[in-house]
Image (cartoon, rainbow, N blue to C red):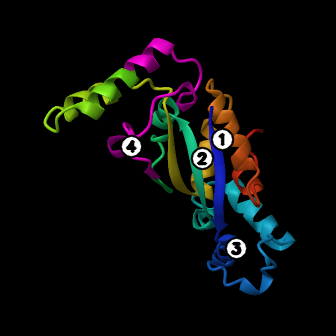
Amino acid sequence: MIQVQTLEVAGIEQAMRAMRNPMDSWARGDTGGGKVGKEDKALTEKLIAAGPEHAKHIRLIQVWADVTAPLYWWKEFDTYRAGVEKVSCSTMHTITKSPFKAEMFSGEVAPQAIEWLEIQRGFWMVAEPDRKAVYWRRIVENLPSGFLQRRTVMMSYAALRQIYKQRNGHRLTEWHVFRVWAAGLPEGWMITEGVDE
């Protein structure tokens, strides 16, 4: 299970202007109101087809999103560093704040595992200050990888294009959902163009 909520997309018009810097061709730009014009689209398509070193301008388009996903998915997402920044909810500060429930996990988690985590949380709640770390550590070390964590992520369209390409056909359904979300972003063709061909 994964949920992706777009917070903001910025820089489309600025990226189209920057694309025209090398040839001083700003007068030919026709993007406005957040929509890429016909001339700018044609040039962008040409640059994308020539490779990432030519489509540098899509690095300037940024998207911010809240992503809630299981820890096993985040381990794979952490592969992506260039053009990606993220800030997660803190396991250290929040893992003991509320009771463990099945909806906090992706897929099926054994009820005994959730019950065990909740017992450890109960011990943590009544423990003397010098013993709290023992129970907290037990929880963190035994937390199932299906535990859902939210992170606010900032990515460039260039990074999303790479992710979209590399995760095509992946076994984890979360990647399919993520790719569908990326393709649906404003001017999402810059992320998907020519990737699935």
Q: Residues within 10 Å of mark 2 (few under 14, many from 20)?
A: some
Image coords of residue 106 (percent x, y): 57, 27
Distance Cα–Cα, label 1 vs label 4: 26 Å
Q: Secondary structure at mark 2?
A: helix
Q: Quadrant of residue 15?
A: bottom right
- Which is more N-terminal, label 1 or label 3? 3
Q: Secondary structure at mark 3?
A: helix
Q: Nearer the viewer, mark 3 or mark 1?
A: 1
Towards the viewer: 54 or 16: 16
- Which is more N-terminal, label 3 or label 2? 3
Magenta stretch contains residue 108: yes
Q: Do callouts 4 and 2 mark residues in contact (Cβ within 8 Å)?
A: no
Give the labeled residue for mark 2.
Answer: 162
At label 3, which amino acid type do we have?
A: Met
Using the rendered image of the protein, determine whether residue 29 is visible from the camera's viewpoint.
yes
Q: Residues within 10 Å of mark 3 (few under 14, many from 20)?
A: many
Q: Residues within 10 Å of mark 1 (few under 14, many from 20)?
A: some
Q: Is residue 131 left or right of residue 179?
A: left
Give the residue displayed 71% in from the left and 46% down from the top. Answer: 181
Image coords of residue 87 (percent x, y): 44, 53
Give the labeled residue for mark 4.
Answer: 94
Using the rendered image of the protein, determine whether residue 192 is visible from the camera's viewpoint.
no
At label 4, which amino acid type do we have?
A: Thr
Q: Quadrant of the N terminus?
A: top right
Q: Secondary structure at mark 4?
A: helix
Image coords of residue 67 (percent x, y): 58, 46
Q: Nearer the viewer, mark 2 or mark 1?
A: 1
- Which is more N-terminal, label 4 or label 1? 4
User: Is 48 drawn above or below residue 145 in the view shown?
Assistant: below
Give the labeled residue for mark 3.
Answer: 16
User: Is 126 drawn above or below residue 113 in the view shown?
Assistant: below
Q: Nearer the viewer, mark 3 or mark 4?
A: 4
